[in-house]
Amino acid sequence: MDTYRVNIVGLSSKIHHFEYEFGDEFFQRYGGELISKGSFIAKVTIDKHETFLEVDFNITGTAQLICDRSLEAFDYPIQIQKMVVFKFGDEDREITEEIMLIHRDTVSLELGQFMYEFISLEVPIKKLHPRFIEDEETEDDENESGKIVYSSSSIDQDDKKEDDDIDPRWEKLKKLK
């Protein structure tokens, strides 16, 4: 777990760069329910200021997913660019997705959990092997090419039917116009 932990107390107030390369062991450590295998490189930039930290995550790699249709494994490319701001305060809490409040006495940041969550959020709900995606796109194109044609006579007949079905009270109101 200490592999992805950054000691922020020892950092000077400037930009610091960190690079992590991780794979299957990382996903087993942080929870392998959604993703169990993959290969990623994370470049993390921490810009330390007096009252806050700007942490920029640039994560690229491939996750091995299981196709929902064929149960066949396939590689799914993922590229993530996220920024999280850690503000120093009196308590630890999440203000928004991009802003976290951390206690001013916090010694280190655990970046591994953030990287796992970012990768997990990029996994599609419907996991399809690329060959099925191509098939679905061609089916969608074929369905979109069909046209529906209305004849003007059928529209006129519908309007006449609506006029015939008008309540007599409305008819008298129309005459007042």
Image (spheres, rainbow, N blue to C red):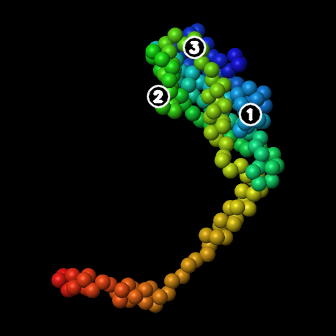
Q: Secondary structure at mark 3?
A: loop
- Quarter assignment of residue 27: top right
Distance from disc 3 to disc 1, alpha carbons, whole Å, reads: 28 Å
Q: Quadrant of the C terminus?
A: bottom left
Q: Which residue is mark 1?
A: 32
**Numbered disc total:** 3
Viewer-nearest of labels 2 and 3?
A: 2
Left or right of 87 in this view: 10: right
Question: Where is residue 147 shown, x and y percent of the image?
Answer: 58, 77
Q: Residue at x 69, y 16 (%)?
A: 2
Q: Secondary structure at mark 1?
A: loop
What amino acid type should be assigned to the residue bearing mark 1?
Gly
Q: Earlier in the sequence, mark 3 or mark 1?
A: 3
Q: Which mark is residue 95?
A: 2
Question: Where is residue 173 shown, x and y percent of the image?
Answer: 21, 82
Q: Residue at x 66, y 37 (%)?
A: 120
What amino acid type should be assigned to the residue bearing mark 2?
Ile
Q: Alpha-carbon neighbours of circle 3 within 10 Å: few (<14), some, or many (≥20)?
A: some
Q: Nearer the viewer, residue 133 or 153?
A: 153
Question: Where is residue 31 shown, x and y percent of the image?
Answer: 71, 31
Residue 22 in sight = no
Image: 36 above or below 20: below
Q: Alpha-carbon neighbours of circle 1 within 10 Å: few (<14), some, or many (≥20)?
A: some
Q: Which mark is residue 8?
A: 3
What amino acid type should be assigned to the residue bearing mark 3?
Ile
Distance from disc 2 to disc 3, alpha carbons, whole Å, reads: 20 Å
Viewer-nearest of labels 3 and 1?
A: 1
Q: Residue at x 48, y 31 (%)?
A: 96
